[in-house]
Image (cartoon, rainbow, N blue to C red):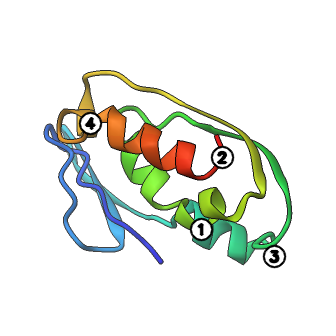
Amino acid sequence: ETITVDVNPGNAMSGQNTVDLHKRDGAVTVALKTIDAHLDSLGLSTAPIHFLKIDVEGVDPLALDGARNLLASGRLRFLTFEYHVLGYWRKRKLSPIVETLRDHGF
């Protein structure tokens, strides 16, 4: 499973499997993988994960969306992520994310 984030001002999901990083001299396209898909690719889909730090400059809600299976599995012991008024946080509220985390035992 992959997600796409357009890292232009606004940080909107575009539905592709890449991220467009716009620079002064052009654009760079980077492939993305969700946290769940990355753990699967490493053979860690059932392994306990002791600590996950998410620091993705404003698109933390999308990273959390991509860790649904891990969060629901009970295999993750500690989680940290940033909340601020930048990036995708302008479109998402913190309270539903906190409720989801509580539902999963955090």
CA distance separating discs 4 and 3: 33 Å
| Residue under pointer 3 | 43
Query: In x, y percent, where is residue 77?
Result: 78, 43
Q: Is residue 87 left or right of residue 33?
A: left
As measured in the structure, the alpha-carbon distance from the residue carrying label 3 to the one carrying label 2 is 24 Å
Q: Quadrant of the C terminus?
A: top right
Report if the CB atoms under discs 4 and 2 are less than 8 Å apart: no
Q: CA distance from mark 4 to mark 2?
A: 20 Å
Of circles 3 and 2, the one toward us is 2
Can you say whether 7 is above or below 48 in the image? above
Q: Residue furthest top?
A: 84
* Amino acid type indicated by mark 4: Lys
Label annotation for residue 69: 1
First-in-chain label (1 vs 4) = 1
Give left or right: position of 16 versus 34: left
Percent x, y of residue 90: 19, 33
| Sequence order check, earlier mark of 1 and 3 | 3
- Residue drawn at (38%, 45%), measured in percent from left and top? 61
Q: Which quadrant of the view contains residue 43?
A: bottom right
Q: Amino acid at mark 3?
A: Gly
Crowding near the residue tagged with mark 4, few <14, some 14–19, many ≥20 C-alpha atoms within 10 Å:
few
Which residue was labeled with disc 2?
105
Mark 4 or 3, nearer chain start: 3
Q: Label 2 sits on what residue type?
A: Gly
Tag 1 and tag 4, C-beta contact below 8 Å: no
Side of 99 relative to 48 (left or right): left
Q: Earlier in the sequence, mark 3 or mark 2?
A: 3
